[in-house]
Image (spheres, rainbow, N blue to C red):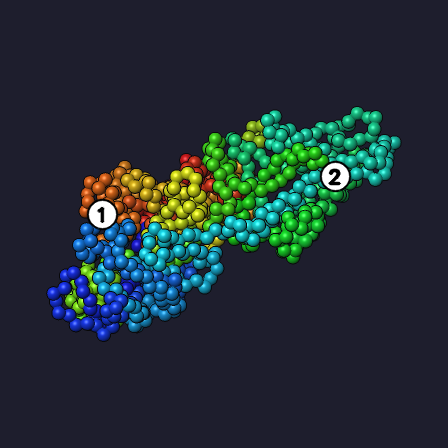
Amino acid sequence: MKKLQLLAYAGAIALLSTGITACSDDNLTQEVTPSPGYNPETNEVNADFVFNVSTGTGSTTRMSSENVQAAITSSNEVFRGIDNAKLFTYKIRNTDNSGVKDGWHIAYAPTPTPVVKMFDLGTVMGRGSIAPASTDKTKSRRVVELNLPVETNTLLFYGKAIKDGTDVTQGAVDMEISANGNMNANFFRLKKIIADGSDTQTEFLQSETLISAVLNKIIRSSYALPADLTMEGRTIPSGRTVRWQDYVTITRDGTDETKITSIVAKTTEPVYPSGESAPAMKALGEILANTYVTFNTIYVRNSQSELRAGSGPAIKRMMNDLYTTIAAVRDASPTNVEETMAKRLAGVICNSIATCFDTSAGCEWKANSNLKGFTELTAAQVDKIGDDEKFTDFPKTEFNLPYGATILQISYNPTLGISAPEYSYMGAIPTYAMGGSSGSTSAFDPSNWVYAPELMYFGNSPIRVTDATKSTADYPDGTTNWVDNDNSQWSDWTDNSHVKSTTRSVAMRNCINYANALLRMNVKYGTNVLKDNNHQIQYERNNGANEPDNVINVQNAGMFQLTGIAIGGVNRSVGWNFLPRYDATVDGTSGEQKPKFGCMVYDSAIPDGTIPTATGPSGGAASAYNYTLLWDNWDDDLKGSAQRVVYVALEFKNMSGKDFWGMNNLIRKDGTFYITAKLDPDAVSVEGKTAQQVIDDKSLGITWPDTYEMPPYYTTDQATADGDQTLDSKTIKERRVFMQDYMTDVTFVLTENSLKHALVAVPDLRSTQISLGLSVDLKWNKGLVFDDVKLEGGQ
């Protein structure tokens, strides 16, 4: 993890004036000269608010370099600007209200309640208004006039990067700031990808209903004989009907009639001439039976259910396979009445498929108007779905969700007149189905997907003051100079002070920093061959069959492509200090009023997902970096112990040209799959320290700031509990996976056995019992490194 210094606003803020006057408790007896800008009625002075941009070189991008200015200090990237800027001035006083308490930042709601004024600065810096890479330092500053209250001694700043892109590429945050300075009312909330109660949510649910209805009508296909059917002296009379499901035996749970326990192909024909005994199943009927079993059986492996992908591309491939098989029955030449019935039923099935899918183009989805007419759903059930739209890329393009967020399930509908299996979409994906323990009942609701946060800024600082009039050029340039108290440009300033009647210029002592945490990741091969899970799957499903694993040679180019990353355990809402907070609006009022860490960020804007080919047995080079902004994941309940482990899932496309077996599923060629990894803040290497020493000392591995304090701050009670009252308001130095203003650097490694852990659906990344299939090399700052730890199914 590296300190984010790129736009860490080197002093980032200065407040200038030509003279300030008023009465303050330490200058009541002094003769002062009022400032021309001083207003005695409001006890405020007109001052200049000055930004100075650092020229650090830390990488600070999300998804692409341009979106969060990764190379702005060394390239021609354009500064995005800052809007939604808010500045609070505080008059912090001693607890007995005897006078101002200088040199303090805001660590918690001060007592007594300070005098607060908010400046709504709006767009304080326009796009391209500064150029940190330029040698012209005049381009690095911006001055805004403000009426600054006297006795001001602490400043609090919030801001967002100007947004000119989409929620997918630049994040989405609801920002609520209390104008009266009530810090507990301030919050920053990630927007849901599908907002509750929105038309988009209705459309999404209707889409799942329509797709399910298509599948259900196809698997419930039947054929009614319009006239007697006679062949070789054997007759099936008119009016006889055969359903596709009549070719199989469906067994249900004895205590839950909706739960299917098995689907088995029958060995005798379901329809035959009257007066005869049921003959053995003929060839065409056997194909129909076996196809029904394969299509509708969701396997259970070690109490973990196979995940049936419900995305548009996955269903297209599934329907193309189905059509190819059933069309062979339709086009066959029957030799008896039973096969003729099977052939005609196959024709009905093929016609149904062709109504909704273009069978001449690999079963591409047809327009939704075709699907609506086929299923005969009511208009109210599908009124949000456009007739001309298609489910080709559902749910990714239309709803910005990963393919794996939509999982099909099959149950039995015992309703009179139906009595048949039916598909529906899982409202929540169970943990056990994604590598968790078989006894787990937790689940992840796909509605909890959220956008990543926008690029945001946070400043929290005491001030410097001087009686000298200063111009913009008089302020130190750059982060290092700004925080250096020995810098000659600070020689006539009073550090950690407050605005007095003689004050002419005011500067924010500390920098404005990024409020976000940043994940920088890439992926590489750690071997030249990857093995799938074929041996284990065949052994379990085919009575101990002994087949080898399939092998994919990744020395060949383009076998797999990174298409996205999901980060779990994200708390949707953060408070005034950009740390996770309980938010009744999104967390509900039941249970403990604590942060839930129950959301997942999905980043699909991967600039370049190409994984360089392996060059030998040890693998190859890493892919290009991808960047994702996140919130700090500090958990106050875990202070003094291990902070939260974070689970991530990498989304890949199978471009190997062949199918392979993952953990529980067949991963189709051109299909999407996911592999999980675990980021543990205690499982890192620190030079000169043992693993136990790292576990025992939570401060190791991070280069902590020594010129200012960063959240989380010690409260008075926490300092007392730790037996050191001097810690009050200081930084709690305990490392975590994601820290605001810091970058977590991760290289994921695909090992020989990684594909054995591939999943069709995105896993529940909150679980502590996830099957892990990636190797991780996590680097923070100065030697904190995961040395390619192999995560291959460990818990």
Dot label at residue 222: 2
Alpha-carbon neighbours of circle 2 within 10 Å: few (<14), some, or many (≥20)?
some
Dot label at residue 299: none
Q: Amino acid at mark 2?
A: Ser
Q: Residue at x 18, y 65 (%)?
A: 23
**Residue projecting furthest to the right:** 233
Q: Quadrant of residue 587?
A: top left
Separation of marks 1 and 2 at Cα, in angstroms:
75 Å
**Residue projecting furthest to the bottom:** 36
**Reading the chain from its start, which is encountered first: label 1 or label 2?**
2
Dot 2: element: strand
Q: Amino acid at mark 1?
A: Asp
Disc 1 target residue: 728
Q: Nearer the viewer, residue 198 or 128?
A: 198
Seen in the picture, residue 413 relative to 588 is either above or below; the reply is above
Q: Residue at x 58, y 31 (%)?
A: 541
Residue 347: percent from the left, percent from the top? 75, 43
The image quadrant where one finds the C terminus is top left
Residue 122: percent from the left, percent from the top? 38, 65
Tell me: 119 left or right of 774.
left
